[in-house]
Image (cartoon, helix red, strand yellow):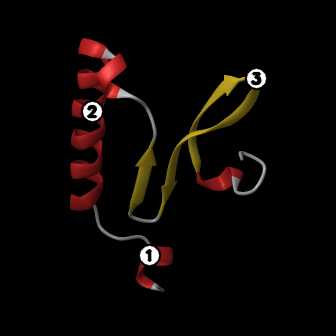
């Protein structure tokens, strides 16, 4: 649920109630969706996500990530 760790929520959606649809914490990224139902837009979302995560992996680690 969004309320538990809003600082890690990268995106929300609303299906009867708001909830986290994407999370980011240090170098962890998570999303949930059904690409088999999303067609071309779902594939583009996956491409964008992989590109974003690839760029994040190349960036220097922040202080919080170094501490773990």
Q: Which mark is residue 16?
A: 3
Q: Nearer the viewer, residue 56 or 37?
A: 37
Q: Which mark is residue 20?
A: none
35 left or right of 5 in image: left
Furthest toward the top, the residue is: 40
User: Where is residue 31 shown, x and y percent of the image?
Assistant: 44, 42
**Disc 1 or 3, which lies upstream in sequence?**
3
Helix, strand or loop status at disc 1: helix
Name the residue at 23% across, 24% down. Answer: 43
**Disc 1 or 2, which lies upstream in sequence?**
2
Q: Which residue is mark 1?
A: 65
Query: Please, is residue 21 above or below residue 38 in the view?
Result: below
Name the residue at 45% across, 65% down. Answer: 26
Furthest toward the bottom, the residue is: 67
Q: Which residue is mark 2?
A: 46
Name the residue at 66% across, 54% down. Answer: 7
18 left or right of 32 in image: right
Query: Please, is residue 12 above or below residue 31 in the view?
Result: above
39 left or right of 29 in image: left
């Amino acid at each position: 649920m969004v309320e538990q760790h809003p600082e890690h929520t990268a995106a929300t959606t609303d299906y009867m109630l708001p909830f986290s649809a994407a999370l980011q914490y240090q170098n962890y990224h998570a999303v949930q969706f059904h690409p088999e139902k999303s067609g071309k837009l779902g594939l583009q979302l996956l491409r964008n996500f992989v590109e974003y995560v690839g760029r994040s992996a190349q960036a220097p680690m922040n202080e919080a990530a170094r501490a773990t």
